Image (tube, grey):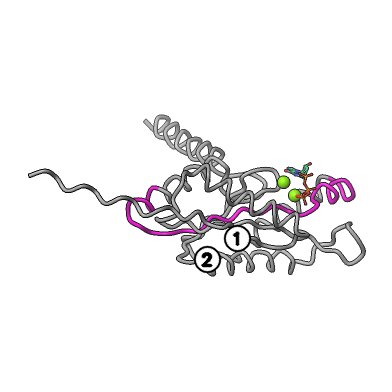
């Protein structure tokens, strides 16, 4: 009896650990890519069904390879952790979620109703990382920074999850091209108003 109970508890613990491993990134303790894919699908479905809106932000550490190459992979890992923690702390609301979606790439899902809210959240994130003051080998006085791309998802701009991600990613790419350590908001595609549903024949 006692042995059975002990076994059951051990199995429960093991299950909990496995679940955590499947959902969280071990280094940064942020939710992983898989959780991001699930979360964005949920936000998207909700936006479509209830007419709610949200913001998708993607960000990437600037010249991270150089930092790794100069200070070593371990220091690179420490920087990843610090950036992840500062992003999580910068977003105060329970509903704002940060994910690690790739090596040095992160995604954020936030409740937002208009473009300027997404822009100001991106700016908060950008400043939070810059404000850490982590030394970067790019040039004397340089610190670790991030570039960000964002998009506001509203009912009238709904495309597909893949296209949304692409829009944020292209905005991030243009932030990189414009010199890094900056945020760019994607131009939303304005969908034509859907045709009125034809009245049913009497
Ligand atoms: P950019 O400003 O254009 O983003 O340049 P970058 O150097 O940051 O971009 P690039 O894609 O060339 O390099 C990304 C680097 O991130 C290469 C890879 O070794 C490093 N990286 C990816 N995952 C990890 C990780 O888990 N730990 C560490 N330390 N480095 C990682
Ligand atoms: Mg990258
Ligand atoms: Mg990078």
The residue labelled by disc 2 is 115
Q: List x then y, in percent, for residue 103.
A: 70, 43
Look at the image and say whether residue 70 sits in the magenta stretch: yes
Secondary structure type for disc 2: helix
The residue lying at 47 percent from left, 64 percent from top is: 112
Seen from the viewer's position, the closer of residues 28 and 194 is: 194
In the rendered image of this protein, does residue 79 appear above or below residue 91?
above
Residue 30: percent from the left, percent from the top? 59, 50
Q: Position of residue 13 (x, y in %)?
A: 49, 39
- Please report the bounds of the magenta region as a residue range: 45-72
Q: Secondary structure at mark 1?
A: strand
Residue that carries the numbered disc 1 in the rendered image: 185
Q: Earlier in the sequence, mark 2 or mark 1?
A: 2
Residue drawn 68% across the image and 64% down it: 126
Is residue 21 part of the magenta span, yes or no? no
> Can you say whether 32 is above or below 50 in the image?
above
51 vs 173, left or right, is left
Quadrant location of the C terminus? top left
Q: Residues within 10 Å of mark 1 (few under 14, many from 20)?
A: many
103 relative to 52 in the view: left or right: right
Q: Nearer the viewer, residue 1 or 136?
A: 136
Are discs 2 and 1 less than 8 Å apart at CB?
yes
Residue at x 48% of width, y 36% of height: 15
Return the mark for residue 152: none
Depth check: give the residue in front, 173 or 143: 173
Q: CA distance from mark 2 to mark 1?
A: 8 Å
């Amino acid at each position: 009896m006692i042995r059975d109970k002990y076994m059951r508890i051990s199995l429960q613990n093991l299950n909990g650990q496995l679940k955590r491993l499947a959902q969280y990134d071990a280094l940064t303790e942020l939710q992983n890519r898989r959780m991001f894919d699930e979360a964005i699908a949920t936000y998207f479905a909700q936006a479509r069904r209830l007419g709610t809106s949200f913001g998708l932000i993607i960000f990437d550490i600037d010249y991270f390879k150089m930092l790794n190459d100069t200070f070593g992979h371990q220091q690179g890992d420490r920087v990843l952790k610090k950036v992840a923690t500062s992003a999580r702390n910068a977003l105060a609301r329970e509903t704002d979620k940060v994910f690690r979606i790739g090596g040095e790439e992160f995604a954020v899902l936030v409740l937002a109703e208009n473009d300027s809210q997404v822009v100001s959240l991106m700016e908060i994130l950008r400043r939070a990382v810059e404000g850490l003051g982590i030394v970067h080998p790019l040039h004397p006085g340089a610190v670790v920074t991030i570039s960000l791309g964002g998009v506001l998802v509203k009912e009238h701009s709904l495309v597909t999850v893949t296209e949304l991600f692409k829009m944020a990613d292209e905005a991030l790419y243009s932030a990189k091209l414009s010199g890094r350590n900056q945020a760019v908001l994607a131009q939303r595609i304005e969908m034509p108003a859907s045709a009125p549903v034809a009245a049913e024949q009497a």
